[in-house]
Each structure stands twice: as C-alpha cells, then as structure tokens.
Image (cartoon, coloured by chain):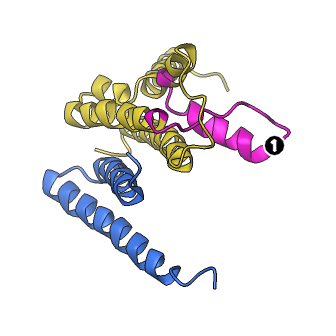
Chain colours: A blue, B yellow
Amino acid sequence: MKSHLLLMAIFAFFVSLVFAVITKDDTREQLRFGGMMFGGFLASALVLGWLMYPFPL
Amino acid sequence: MRATAAEETQSGTLFLLCLASWAIPGAGHLWLGRRSKGLIFLVALPLMFAIGVAIRGRLFPFELADPLVGLAALANLGIGATYFIAGALGYGGGDVRAVTYEYGNAFLIVAGLLNMLVVIDAYDVAMGRKS
C-alpha cells in the first residue's frame, strides 16, 4: 500500500469517524459532520497538493 | 477540607473508568452504557494503530534529550495497552527507508491522541457534562 492519496483518505476517514462520534450523539448528525469533515480533509489536501505543484521552482 | 467517603468512592471509580478507557479504547464508553460509541472506538482506534505499524511507522522511544521524539512517544502511549502489546511482540520498529514511514508515524501518533480525546469524553460523560 504505497498510494499516498489512499493512505490520506484512510487517515481522514478514521479521524473524521472518531471526531463525529465524540462530538455528536444523533446518528444523522454524526454522518453529516463526519462526511463534511472527511470531504474537507480530501478537498484541502487536493487543493494544497496542486498549489504546491510548481515547487521546488 | 476532607473529602467524604462518597466523593472518594466516586473519584476512585472515575480514575478506574479513565484508566480502562485509556488501556482499552472505548472501554470507558462501554462501561457507561454507550455501547455503539464504545464499539466504534474499540474497532477504529486499534485498527488505525495497526495500519500505522503495518506501513512501517515507528513507536518512538522516550528520549527527553529530543523533545519532539519525547512528545511523539507520549502521543504513541495514548493508545494504551495496544502500545505495550505491539512493543512486546516486536512491532513498531519503523523503517525510515519505507515510502510510507511518515504516514505510519502519523497514524500511530494520531491514534494515540484520539484515544486521549476519547478518555476525556468518557470522563465528561461520567461527570454528567455530556449526555
């Protein structure tokens, strides 16, 4: 397992899962919060990855 | 002012609850009757730790001379009994040449830190601060 994207997605999944379960009690809220957090992780990693693409110059 | 016997019993129980929650992720929530939350922690956190070990992350030693290594060791310890089991079985040596080494470290460190949050959450539930 050497895919950085896959490892990052797995990492984001676990962190989002634990945070959603800790912070919310209702299952629907947990799914919503966890999904948003997971999506935020993936989106920010992809955006930052593309922003860093030209470096080193 | 001396604590009453009831307060001492409660603080003793709280200590045991936090200790159990630290040693076995999710045990505190299971103890308090939060079965679904406890089971999720019981599966997710050791699995995250196991993935970290499998992709050749390192369990850091307690080296106070290097503060970052010491802090990483403290975070690793947060996962509880799993840390000692992995150490006793010879896992967690890490392989700095592996392309997944840093990812493995992130998995191991964050699994420990998340378990510390779970312990605090169990304490809050036991104190009645959370439902």
Image quadrant occupied by the N terminus of chain B: top right
The foreground one among B99 and B80 is B99
**Total label count?**
1
Q: Is residue B79 magenta?
A: yes
Residue B77 falls left or right of residue B33: right
Instruction: Indicate the quadrant where residue A42 lies.
Output: bottom left
Residue B34 seen in render: yes
* Quadrant of the drawing holding the C terminus of chain B: top left
Q: Residue furthest right?
A: B65
Residue at position x 61%, y 43% from top?
Answer: B97
Q: For the view shown, which residue lies furthest in the left direction?
A: A28
Q: Secondary structure at mark 1?
A: loop
The spot of residue B30 in percent (x, y) is: 28, 26
Asked if the stretch drawn in magenta spans residue B99, the answer is no
Q: Residue at x 41, y 79 (%)?
A: A47
- Residue for badge 1: B66
Query: Where does the magenta region start and end?
Result: B53-82
Task: Give residue B56's position: percent from left, percent from top.
Answer: 52, 36
| Amino acid type indicated by mark 1 | Asp
Answer yes or no: is residue B7 visible: no
Q: Nearer the viewer, residue A51 or A2?
A: A2
B16 relative to B70 in the view: left or right: left
Q: Residue at x 27, y 53 (%)?
A: A24
Q: Tag 1, which chain?
A: B
Q: Locate residue A34, reporting x and y percent.
A: 27, 58
Q: Nearer the viewer, residue B31 or B104?
A: B104
Residue B96 percent across, percent down from the top left: 63, 42
Residue closer to the observer: B131 or A36: A36
Packing grade of label 1 (10 A; few <14, some 14-19, many >=20) is few
